[in-house]
Image (spheres, rainbow, N blue to C red):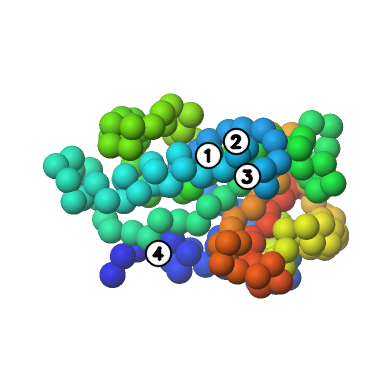
């Protein structure tokens, strides 16, 4: 059976609906950085999706070709994630999505080195005849966070985030966006799920007061 990160690491991908504290270990991702409203039909964000999944599935299906990756195991491609930032804003301002600066990303299995990632970029570029140069091997050491499972449309996230930040405050912590970002993990496909049933993991980085 293929390894499924969501099932094996439930503390990271299937948290409760109540805020909890969690320490996230360092992870590697395929990532694309960009700016602008993610809902724009022909915007940078939609273009980034093609790059991310193109690389992710090139690596996943590599075992069927001649290139063998040392330590490879069959796995389910982890869910899409996003780090979100707006200049001068702590967290996110959903009323001004056009000012978003984002890093869209998909977790890479531990066997994917930078060299294997570079191979995947070259392979995807050759096979799909598309420029994958914006995709990067991204290392993120997130550390201590408050997180929660948000059920509902993305625009209703602020209430869940307020609950998370209040919980962290009550535990003696403060949000810390100095080097880390508002983080979302998308467990539902919005194209196939009604907004009221969308599941999103929300995380805010925190520090001891």
The residue at which mark 2 appears reads as: 44
Q: Is residue 98 left or right of residue 75?
A: right
Decide: marks 4, 1 in contact (CB < 8 A)? no
Neighbours of disc 4 within 10 Å: few (<14), some (14-19), many (20+): few
Residue at 45% over, 69% down: 7
The residue at which mark 1 appears reads as: 48
> Which of the two labelled residues, at mark 4 and mark 1, occupies the earlier sequence position?
4
Neighbours of disc 3 within 10 Å: few (<14), some (14-19), many (20+): few
Decide: marks 2, 4 in contact (CB < 8 A)? no
Decide: marks 2, 1 in contact (CB < 8 A)? yes
- How far apart are the alpha carbons under marks 3 and 1? 12 Å
The residue at which mark 4 appears reads as: 4
Rendering coords of residue 182 (x, y %): 70, 46
The residue at which mark 3 appears reads as: 41
Between residues 27 and 93, which one lies in front from this camera angle? 93
> Which of the two labelled residues, at mark 3 and mark 1, occupies the earlier sequence position?
3
Rendering coords of residue 133 (x, y %): 43, 27
Neighbours of disc 2 within 10 Å: few (<14), some (14-19), many (20+): some
Between circles 3 and 2, the one closer to the viewer is 3
Residue 172 visible somewhere in the drawing: yes
């Amino acid at each position: 059976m293929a390894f499924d990160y969501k099932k094996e690491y439930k503390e990271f991908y299937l948290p409760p609906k109540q805020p909890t504290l969690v320490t996230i270990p360092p992870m590697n991702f395929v990532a694309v950085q960009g700016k602008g409203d993610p809902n724009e039909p022909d915007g940078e964000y939609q273009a980034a999706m093609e790059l991310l999944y193109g690389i992710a599935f090139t690596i996943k299906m590599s075992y069927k070709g001649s290139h063998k990756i040392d330590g490879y195991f069959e796995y389910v491609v982890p869910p899409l994630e996003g780090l979100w930032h707006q200049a001068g804003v702590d967290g996110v301002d959903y009323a001004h999505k056009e000012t978003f600066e984002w890093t869209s990303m998909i977790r890479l299995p531990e066997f994917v080195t930078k060299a294997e990632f570079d191979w995947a970029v070259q392979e995807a570029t050759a096979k799909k005849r598309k420029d994958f140069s914006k995709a990067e091997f991204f290392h993120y050491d997130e550390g201590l966070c408050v997180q929660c499972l948000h059920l509902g449309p993305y625009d209703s996230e602020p209430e869940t985030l307020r609950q998370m930040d209040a919980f962290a405050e009550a535990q003696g912590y403060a949000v810390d966006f100095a080097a880390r970002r508002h983080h979302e993990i998308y467990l539902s496909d919005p194209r196939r799920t009604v907004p009221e049933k969308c599941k999103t993991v929300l995380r805010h980085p925190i520090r001891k007061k």
